[in-house]
Amino acid sequence: MSLKKYLTIAALVGCGAQLALADTIQLKDAVVTGKILAEKPDALVVDLGYTVLLIPRTAVTGVTKSGPTGAALVAVTPATGQFYSSDNKAAVARDVSSLVKQIGEAVVQVRTPGGLGSGFFVNDEGYLITNFHVIEGETEISVEVYQQKNGQLDRETYKQVKIIAINKFHDLALLHIEDKGAPKFMPVTLGNSDALNVGDGVFAIGSPLGLERTVTQGILSTKTRQLEGELYLQTSAQINPGNSGGPLFNLAGEVVGVTNMKITFGEGLGFAIPVELVKSFLDHRDTFAYSADNPNNPFRYLEPPSRTKAQPVDGK
């Protein structure tokens, strides 16, 4: 059960509890009001009146302490400031031309000494998604952004790019532009690939073979193409090297997948990672945090136990 779901249930059970002191703890996806009993190096111990909650420090984004102001109700409310924008509601389809004009700035080109790929911003703070294989083993990454100025797109290159998180099993990477003076960027909205139907129109924006800002349109060929043990969206929209890491949009302009491969000996056989995996990756980005000490794997493994030699039952 997620922390947010647990806290929501707790609030419903104990909505009548009262506390003499009330401290407010801001989490990444919730706000908890209660009395802080202890502040440990790795966690806060919070009295909700009907139970005591242990909150990991990694989940806390801020604490507001209050004095003896009288009784306070336990409150759990959704936090503001989501890391990305998401819409699971059915959206109205529009023509591709107008959508490209509206959301084209959110799509970027990711360059490394070993090649190039595509990507897209998930918020205006410069956080962007691309494929893991685009930046695998690379330490020098630059991002080319196209922004509307005076009615035309101007290209700006940012070279202070940090790898935030990686998941090589789902071929995803989260990057952050950290150049001083970088402006706010245009983000995309993450849609719902589960709501797609086979035959629905989709389109991709990317840089196939280095041909920047190329738009290709097609349909969703299947939602559950299994390749190497993973399920992918299959599309007839043309996907080529350089499209990797770019967005696959529905006709409402929402990202429903991340393009990452094609069958080289065929045409119209492109594949994309479903956006639900992208959301899970972003929601659990701390789990997949990138480490320079272990650049190709976000997981840490314990040393295996030494094998115990078998002993005869008679002790000989």
Image (cartoon, helix red, strand yellow):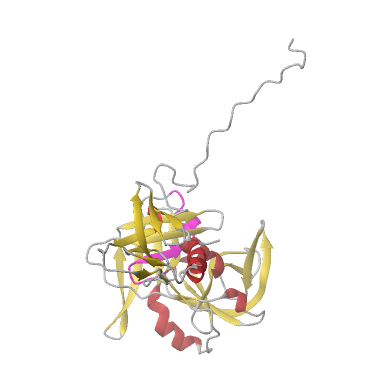
Q: Quadrant of the N terminus?
A: bottom right
Q: Is residue 86 above or below residue 132?
A: below
- Residue closer to the observer: 189 or 142: 189
Which residue is depicted at the point 34% across and 56% down?
36
Left/right of residue 169 with respect to residue 265 in the rendered view:
left
Q: Is residue 243 above or below residue 201?
A: above
Q: How many marks?
A: 0
The span picked out in magenta is 121-137
- Give the x, y percent position of residue 26: 35, 64
- Residue closer to the observer: 85 or 37: 37
Which residue is depicted at the point 35% across and 47% down?
40
Res 161 quadrant in image: bottom left
- Give the x, y percent position of residue 105: 37, 77
**Magenta includes 136?**
yes
Res 135 quadrant in image: bottom left
Residue 142 visible in the picture: no
- Give the x, y percent position of residue 3: 49, 61
- Give the x, y percent position of residue 31: 39, 67
Left/right of residue 306 with respect to residue 144 in the rendered view:
right
Q: Is residue 26 above or below residue 114?
A: below
Q: Quadrant of the C terminus?
A: top right
**Magenta includes 291?**
no
Left/right of residue 279 with respect to residue 235 in the rendered view:
left
Residue lying furthest top in this view?
316
- Residue closer to the observer: 206 or 249: 249
- Residue closer to the observer: 15 or 265: 15
